[in-house]
Amino acid sequence: MAASNQLSAPSEGAPDQYTVGVDFGTLSGRAVVVRTRDGQEMGSAVHDYPHAVIERGLPGSDAPLPPDWALQHPEDWREVLRIAVPAALAASDVPASQVVGIATDFTACTVLPTRADGTPLSLTPEFADRPHAWPKLWKHHAAQAQADRINALAHERGEAWINRYGGKISAEWQYAKALQVLEEDPDVYAACARWIEAADWIVWQLTGAESRNACTAGYKGIHQEGGYPSAEYLGALHPEFADFAQTRLEHPLARLGSRVGSLTAEAAAWTGLPEGIAVAAGNVDAHVTAPAAQAVENGQLLAIMGTSTCHVLNGDRLADVPGICGVVDGGIVDGAYGYEAGQSAVGDIFAWWLRQGAPADYLAEAERRGEDLHTLLTRKCADQPVGAHGLVALDWMNGNRSVLVDHHLSGVIVGLALDTRPEDVYRALLEATAFGTRVIVEAFEGGGVPVTEFVVAGGLKKNALLMQIYADVLNRPVSLADSEQGPALGAAIHAAVAAGVHPDVRTAAAAMGRVQRHAYRPDPDRAKAYEGLFAVYRELHDQFGTGTDLLLHRLRRLRNAARTSRP
């Protein structure tokens, strides 16, 4: 756990008020203490999850998990409240009595089955050794077969909601994962009283009462036009699935930024915050970042770039955009249609190449120069003319979220030669993620949802080469969120609204958010050169990602069969 502080003098007159934002990511949770009048970040702390991502086997078990599984431990999340929040408060030097609210955000769709009182089934003696009782992380992709059936039946029946999700429901989302539980471990499904996003479960821990937020319900829970899919449709998927939404999801939905409860005495003891302060509705890490980056107006596309990328965008009209993750009325801010798209791996792809592609002499050079491998490879490829490496890659190492919505696709690199160097592949992978984002931007604009500004938040905005590549590939300026911890700041902004300090999220964003407009601008010559590479990317994208009996699907089936048949 690491903590940092950033102090400034208090204003004259009444004492300043502060809120706490807590961002639950894939590998760690971060807390930040923020001044509500101007968004000044007073102190922060990070707590790494001891169990990280559970991919090989349950804690304490030698039994391997099947391919494409990704689970988490709910106690790791509670530890963030016990460790990171008090540490951030201590680092801030802000008196706890001046904190008026707390809000959280989470990776989505991270879901878990619980008892009626919110107890995770994974923490009960009878189900602790059952993998399906554990929270399924967003990148649990083992429910693709269920997702395929959900989509096929929706189109067969002409379900109106399917077009709100670009024509496909993802294997990452609530229904595919829940149906997988029912079909592979019906005892766990029967014991599941509530099927809940971690975004809402953590708020339950803070307030002592269940709540559900409009964001995750709309984007991941297929809640449209005031309701979930019908019992008739769900029963056609599986007879015992008919009442899934009614019994395990149904609950009044809270608007984003609204107060859903007060901090309990138990949660106050965990966090060191005052009992009774406002607790805001849960939210998604990407969507909550928009006010932190002052990207809440129509047309401002925000890309939150980290291990993966989520793209969120407000529009003034409802449009069906093929291949997006969803559109929800009020899904980002009230009064606008919030659109979402994404890429399942971005930073994860770069990290993968560092693990695989750096030979011994590169490692020695990095150590000699005091550089990390990202810096070394960036330096070696930064001055390459566009296309000089002769490569184009498909950014599907963790499947494709948008616009193909297929998590059984996999990565492709074409153009490899005996003189290809590690930095060539590294640059091609950087470019591949930019090409994937361009496909998403073009899908939005082709669907009638204009993109007027491209804004980046997340850890990858610090890579200057990557940001310039995005500006050149998109042929438009790139703006940067000013905060290094956009989701946590965004959560703190929502907490300020829940506490009544600001009347709404837009007003709070204007006061507390920060952005560097047009920090990177496209170079006309490089932008023109990238048109040729993007044309190759698009051809590969359509060749490997569309059609029937895809080559990459066949490879995935062969891989999974080999892995599950080994002794």
Image: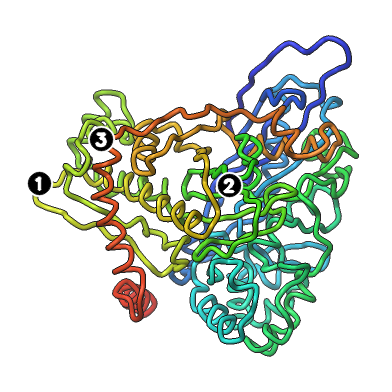
- Give the residue displayed 36% in from the left and 34% down from the top: 522
- Give the residue displayed 22% in from the left and 31% down from the top: 383
Q: In terms of secondary structure, where does tag 3 sit? A: helix
Q: In terms of secondary structure, where does tag 2 sit? A: loop
Check the image and report above or below for 189 versus 317. below
Task: Report the amino acid beneath label 3.
Answer: Asp
The picture quadrant where one finds residue 498 is top right
Give the labeled residue for mark 1.
Answer: 419
The spot of residue 540 in percent (x, y) is 28, 63
Dot in front, 3 or 2: 3
Q: Using a 10 Å C-alpha cutoff, classify the residue at mark 2 as few (fewer than 14 neighbours), some (14 to 19) or many (20 or more).
A: some
Quadrant for the C terminus in the image: bottom left
Apparent side of residue 59 relative to residue 476 in the rendered image (left or right): right
Q: Is residue 202 visible?
A: yes
Direction left: furthest residue: 418
The spot of residue 125 in percent (x, y) is 71, 68
Task: Report the amino acid beneath label 1.
Answer: Asp
Q: Earlier in the sequence, mark 3 or mark 1?
A: 1
The span from disc 3 to disc 1 (Cα, nearest Å) is 26 Å
Give the labeled residue for mark 2.
Answer: 25
Task: Report the amino acid beneath label 2.
Answer: Gly
Quadrant for the N terminus in the image: top right
Give the labeled residue for mark 3.
Answer: 525
